[in-house]
Amino acid sequence: MSRIAYVNGRYVPHREAAVHVEDRGYQFADGVYEVCEVRNGRLIDERRHMERLQRSLSELRIARPMSLPALSIVLHEVVRRNGVRDGIVYLQVTRGVAKRDHAFPPPGTRPAIVVTASRIDPAKTERYAAEGIAVVTLPDNRWERVDIKSISLLPNVLAKQVAREQGAREAWFVGADGTVTEGSSSNAWIVTSGNEVLTRKADHAILKGITRTVLLDVLKAHDLKLVERPFTVAEAIAAREAFITSASQTVMPVVRIDGKPVGNGAPGLISTALRADFSRYTEKS
């Protein structure tokens, strides 16, 4: 089956999908995006993703390209046309096409929208989860509004590349105060020796992950104590467990940080249990 993309009102072959050279997303990274998990052909937590999309658009003063019901139809149709049973659907909205100028384009400029879908092999992801992943740490050099899901991701790209070059799957950003903010494409968590689950408060320093939000409900169901505060790299290495959360990986155990083992160097019982139970608390559409 050939892939299909949705671009500005049209479903087109993926290989032919294109945006204008003066799309402000291409020129200025002037746009936002969302990535929604697809499981068994259904969108996971679509409502929450659309709420965050609306917030990101509002923060950047970009108009929504269509109503939420219409957008939902497009998302589901792209998933259907691509035959994606397990994977992701990607949505990007930019300020639109206009003559290159840093200031906003003239009123009435229509926002541009692109939607694609792709498959992810669940078995491969499960193998990573069974073994656990390694992360490396890097100075956080991003702008101060990473709570907005902007397409301006160059620091994240560079961090991810450093991780891959060092044999790791993820990079954790570390602020000037020595505490971990989040991963290049995930939220960061640790489990203390007292079985407290630590993650940074969702302020302007991190993206409020949808998987993170759902996991708060899972923690309550498991009667685990949540503590929202920054933690240092040293705390993370000394922790009983560590893990990351994201739409494409849900709960993924971390077993090494900067080459040092976390706990016994294997996925922990708590992160494994949270991963196993996570799906029960998501919304399917």
Image (cartoon, rainbow, N blue to C red):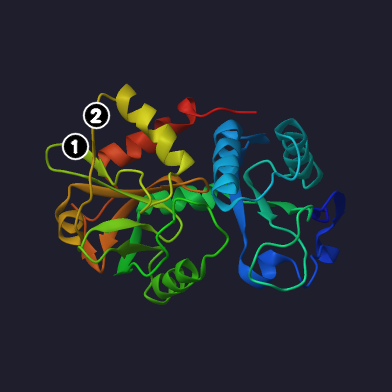
Q: What kind of element bears circle 1?
A: strand
Residue at the image position 39 percent from the left and 70 percent from the top: 163
Q: Amino acid at mark 1?
A: Glu
Is 105 placed above or below 214 here? below
Q: Which residue is mark 2?
A: 224
Res 177 → quadrant? bottom left
Q: Is residue 150 left or right of residue 68?
A: left
Res 221 → quadrant? top left
Screen quadrant of the C terminus: top right
- The x, y position of residue 77, in whole percent, is 79, 39
Q: Which residue is mark 1?
A: 196
Is 138 placed above or below 144 here? below
CB atoms of marks 1 and 2 within 8 Å: yes
Q: Earlier in the sequence, mark 1 or mark 2?
A: 1
Residue at the image position 42 percent from the left and 64 percent from the top: 143
Is 167 placed above or below 63 here? below
